[in-house]
Amino acid sequence: MEAIERHAVSLDWITLLLVLVLGLLVVAKYAFTQRFAHFSMLFATDKYLLLKGKDPNLFHPFNVLLFAVNVISAGLFIFIFYISFTEGYPDRPLVVFLRIITAYTTFVLLKFSLEKILADVISVNNKMNYYLFYKLSYRNFTALVLLPISVFFLYSWEPTKLVLYIVLGLILILNLITLLSVFTKNRQYISSNWFYFILYLCALEIGPYYILYKLVTKFQGQ
């Protein structure tokens, strides 16, 4: 009988990441109990945004903790995409993951910095702070929802490319709904500053993602 070589893939590093995520969520829940309770109902009610959006502190420890969870969750999902669209499992998966979250964090923070600079230039800091807080809150919540899906894909079921595209499409739709929601709530302000709005939309909401798409497709073509 001929022996068949079996390749075992260790997921120990992912398990440690999940323990870290749970630790961050426990700290966020017990250090900021009321804020966490309001945040957990974000898609059901606007209470969190109404209470915390009046004077949004983007660098509040609660936001920082959830952004760290966001980075890990998004990084795991992108990692799943990576191993699904490349031949063979990477020899050093943790290194690949670290590169992914470094690129993701750099992209998000760079985009955030450019948005803040633009807000300073056109003197709309208050409006921009609320807008950034609004986006950050919904994207952190979306990352929490995405996390168990990624865990299921990694530990229980290997997704097809079609399933991954469907999940990605749903994430993009949620982000689009988030943007349309905040634009609708501020339509009067936007209508009186439509030039700056179009400038922002093209330069910082469409442009960065288009550039990222071109870079990724160019990388895949090599």
Image (cartoon, grey):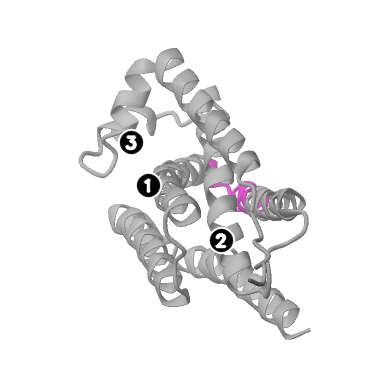
Identify residue type, mark 3: Leu
Identify residue type, mark 1: Val
Identify residue type, mark 2: Ile
For image coordinates 53% across by 36% down, the residue present is 18
Give the side of residue 33 with respect to residue 132, left or right.
Answer: left
What distance separates the C-alpha of mark 2 from that of mark 3?
Answer: 32 Å
Q: Which mark is residue 49?
A: 3
Question: Farthest front residue?
Answer: 1
Answer with the quarter of the image where residue 165 lies.
Answer: bottom left
Rendered location of residue 199, percent (x, y): 56, 68
Residue with the mark numbered 2:
80
Seen in the picture, residue 176 relative to 125 is either above or below; the reply is: below
- Magenta stretch? 112-125
For image coordinates 26% across by 44% down, the residue present is 43
**Viewer-proximal residue among 160 and 165:** 160
Label 2, residues with CA under 10 Å away: few <14, some 14-19, many ≥20: some
Q: Which mark is residue 145?
A: 1
For image coordinates 37% across by 47% down, the residue present is 145
State whether residue 121 appears in this view: no
Q: Secondary structure at mark 2?
A: helix
Label 1, residues with CA under 10 Å away: few <14, some 14-19, many ≥20: few
What distance separates the C-alpha of mark 1 from that of mark 2?
Answer: 16 Å
Q: Secondary structure at mark 1?
A: helix
What distance separates the C-alpha of mark 1 from that of mark 3?
Answer: 19 Å
